[in-house]
Structure formats: structure tokens, C-alpha cells
Amino acid sequence: MNKAAEDIRFLHRHEIDLEKWDYCILHAPNGLVYARSFYLDTMADKWSALIQGDYEAVMPLTWNRKYGISYLYQPPFMAQLGIFDLNKKGPIDAENFIHQAKKHFKFCEIHLNAANEVSESVPHANFILALEKSYSDIRGGYKKRLLENLSEAKSHDLHYSKSDDFSTTVSLYEKTYGSRFPQVKKRHYLKFLSLCRELVDRNMLLVRQVKDGSGQLLSSNIFFKDHQRIYNIMSVTLTVGRDKRSHFLLIDQLIQEFAAHPLLLDFEGSELPAIAEFYRKFGSKDCPFPFLRYNLLPFPFNLFK
């Protein structure tokens, strides 16, 4: 084992210095809102961590227990975690952290982040759009079909607006799409509502809506925002909204709202071709993150999942 691996220690949640932890996440070039301590505390059933040095690099370990077996899992509404390195720019060698994680958890299904390199992982799509250019420059990268959809949307007298009503969006999302994600239970939506309230207090939550001329809601999105990214966390479009292309207008108007800011619009990943193609239409680039799965359990426990 090399020196870097020896310097990595495992800590339970109560042993973690949260001030140092959040400093690392906030200042790491690959820092993400999902790894902030308040986010983990709210959305993860349990979490521990691997810490290198004096919090120069950290890895949250979100875990649960089933049949007496502790395992790593990816909580809902938490697209990426993995290793965050305070000093590293570019790809991070994550192998030492994974080696240590295997000592504590013999089963794992988690998402790392785009800066992590792990040989045994599988890439999952994640679409990113830089907002630093002017709106006209960004719009210049739109696909032809998107421009046609936006023209159609504008013919329906649609109106883009800000809102504080995140709970309606969550309720509509659960009602409209909940059956597609049976692994997301009622308790997860309740946790997500708590997270939204926390983010409102931190001035990190955006709700954007599109309504028609009569005031009928067609599309609503919840975005999280930190100093580096706007995260497309939850989006819902009603049937009448799809017919009027309201979801195209909502994203376009958000881009116009935040254009010329040093931010990334993180559409989050999707393995569904239609959704991936929707994100590509805005000129976004695929910055895949690794999906890591391993099963080191002995028989018959290796049939665990």
C-alpha cells in the first residue's frame, strides 16, 4: 500500500469535523452541493467518510443496512458524490479511496463524480452548459430543432416567472413521475421537502415556472444554486405544457436569466435517450460521472442484490 492510501482514515459521522469538511467541499475544484454536510444529513439514511490528511481530500460514504449487512448506496436526489480534493485540478486518482471503502463495505452501488477515475466503473451521462458567455452566444449553440420548439412555445403566449412554491413542484413531480421511480419512497420526498426549506434559508433554491395566459401552470422546475453551479434537481411538465413546449421555454429563459455569470448549468444525468437529447439541444456537453458497483460478499450473501 502506498503512502497516500495509508493517510486515508475512516470516520463515523459524529467524528467528522464539519467545518473542515464543508471547507473542503466548498473550495475543491470539483466540489458539489450534494456533498455539503447539511445535504448529506438530510438525504442520506446514514453517512460516514474517508478523510485524507487534514481534510485535503474527502469521500462521503452514504450507507444503510439490510439483513445485518452494511452497504453503500446512492440516496435519491443526490446525483454525484465520490472523492473531492481540495488541491487537485483535473482527474483525481480515486483508486486508493475505493480500496479503503472496500474494507468497510463489501457491497456498493454509488455514483462518483466526473473528476474521479476508477477502472471498474461504468460512465453515466451528465450534461453541463457553461453560462459565462452572453445569452446570444449561448443561443448560437442551440440546435435547429430547439429554436423551432422555442418559436412554437412563444406562439402560445407563455410566461416565465419566479416562484417560492417548491412544495407544489414536489407534489406534482411525485404524482406525475413517481411510478417511474419506485425506489423513491414517500419518506424520500418528505426529506427532500426538508432539504428545500434548508436551501431557502441559505438562499440556494430557485423555483421557476411557465404558465399560459390564463395563469395555468404548465411547467415547474426546482434548481439548487451554489457558487459554481445551478443544478436542475426536479422538473415537471404537465401534458398541456408538453403540447405547448413550455419545458423548452423554461430552460431557455433560465439560461437568459443567468447568462454571463461564471456558473455551470448542470442538467444532471439521464440514461434515457429522449431526455439526453433534450439536454443536448441546448448545446450542453456530456461530462460523464462513474457508476461504481462491486459485490465482495461471500456466498450466499453475494446474491444480496
Image: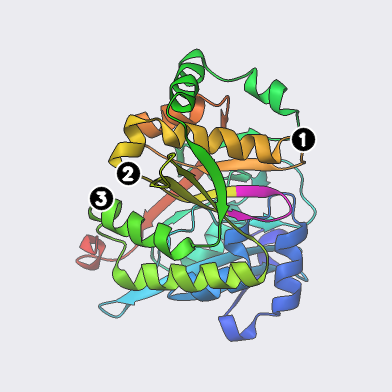
In the picture, residue 253 is in which quadrant? top right
Quadrant including the N terminus: bottom right
Q: Give the percent coordinates (x, y) of residue 82.
A: 57, 56
The reply to whether the C-beta atoms of the residues labelled 2 and 1 are less than 8 Å apart is: no
Task: Give the extent of the magenta segment.
Answer: 224-230
Does the magenta run of residues contain 229? yes
Residue at 45 percent across and 23 percent down: it is: 155
Q: Residues within 10 Å of mark 1 (few under 14, many from 20)?
A: some
- The label on residue 260 is 1
Q: CA distance from mark 2 to mark 1?
A: 30 Å
Residue at 29 percent across and 51 percent down: it is: 177
In the picture, residue 90 is in which quadrant? top right
- Mark 2 and mark 1 lie on one chain; the one further toward the N terminus is 2
Q: Give the percent coordinates (x, y) of residue 129.
A: 62, 34
Q: CA distance from mark 1 to mark 3?
A: 36 Å
Of the residues tagged 2 and 3, which is closer to the observer?
2
Nearer to me, 96 or 30: 30
- The amino acid sitting under disc 1 is Ala
Does the image show residue 203? yes
- Residue with the mark numbered 3: 180
Quadrant including the C terminus: bottom left
- Mark 1 and mark 3 lie on one chain; the one further toward the N terminus is 3
Does the magenta run of residues contain 150? no
Residue at 67 percent across and 47 percent down: it is: 92
- Image height check: is 77 above or below 42? above
- The label on residue 77 is none
- The label on residue 238 is 2
In the picture, residue 107 is in which quadrant? bottom left
Of the residues tagged 1 and 3, which is closer to the observer?
1
